[in-house]
Image: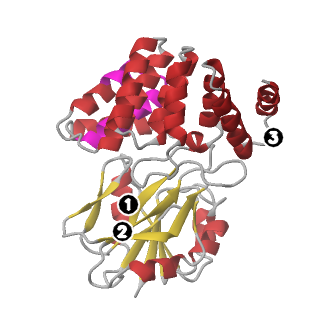
Amino acid sequence: MKIAIYCICKNESLHIERFMQTAQEADHIYITDTGSSDNSIELLKQYSNVTVNTALINPWRFDDARNISLSFVPLDVDVCVCVDLDEILSPGWRQAIERVWIPNKTTKLKYKYNWSHLEDGSPGTTFWYEKIHSRSGYRWVKPVHEVLHSYIDENIAMSYDFQLDHWPDLSKSRSNYLALLKLAIDEEPEDDRSAHYYGRELMFNGRYEDAIIELKRHINLKSAVWIPEVANSMRYIARCYFNLNDINNALYYSQMACIKCPEQREVWLEFAKIAYHNQDYLSSYYASKKCVSIIERELTYISEPESWSELPWDILSISAYNIGHLSDARNAIKEAIKINPYDSRLQSNAELLSKD
């Protein structure tokens, strides 16, 4: 089975050596440089198993860049692995693909993607990705947050052994994301995914009123049928209202998110934080307890590190204390300290609870 990696590149010289150390299991690597001004091209050409092509994409959009990059991959390649140079493939990744990929049947692979990492190097924000595919039958769509569109009958395999880790250059700006997401909305106004991402990006940029309008538009679209995404739009609406000091609406939409997708930690933590801020300890106790009762990360929507940190246990402990559930308060603070044993405030709370 012939496996090729293909990437787009622009000023990635800092990542090339690290990336190439993990990419050597591929039969060949095809890099499309989109206008580097550093020495990325020179560094890449030092590797015998790398082919470097150049392409200028103007106006810039990620789907065009990916499609041009894919076009350089020969048609006899069986498996195309689309990655970026600031990502690291886990050792044995080729064997992980070969274990689940059935030749002439499998068309795409779903696998774990660690988008960010905590200070100790453990996974932060994680979700499941689908950027490994057959050579034919796919093209990239959407100007940003691009996805593979199939024009064949898909057969998707799942790998629990393949893992891709993202170690981004935090100095690189994502300032063009809003414009590209607005372009995606203009091109397909009824596309639920683009509406969700556009609303979220508006929130990230502090445009809370605009974010609320777009996220409400998303949850009311007929095409918005993916429950975890709809629930998280509700969660983001709640966060926007909270930042606008509209606590009643923040509480309402955070509760709606929990009703919509009760199996997700993130929605319960959002509700718990808002209720706790409002000193509604009964509600924050209930929400944080529901949050920590979920013990497995979801395989669907984005899993955020805060939901798996000491925070939900911390809120649970303080809330339980304030409503007189001292046993729950003691147990919760112990769990919080297990996750973050060096937090002096948690240690102090545990000491106070031991005296009650």
| Secondary element at tag 2 | helix
Residue 95 is inside the magenta segment = no
Q: Nearer the viewer, residue 218 or 242?
A: 242
Q: Tell me: 61 left or right of 278.
A: left
Furthest residue in direction left, as rendered: 222
Instruction: Tell me if residue 208 comes above or below residue 35 in the rendering.
Output: above
Amino acid type of the residue that numbered disc 2 sits on in the rendered structure: Leu
- Image spot of residue 157 (x, y percent): 35, 71
Question: Can I make out residue 233 in this image?
Answer: no
Dot 3 corresponds to which residue? 342
Disc 3 to disc 1, how far (Cα)?
Answer: 44 Å
- Image spot of residue 331 (x, y percent): 68, 38
Amino acid type of the residue that numbered disc 3 sits on in the rendered structure: Tyr
Dot 2 corresponds to which residue? 70
Q: How is the image coloured?
A: secondary structure
Disc 2 to disc 3, how far (Cα)?
Answer: 47 Å
Q: Mark 2–mark 1 contact, CB under 8 Å? A: yes
Stretch in magenta: 191-213
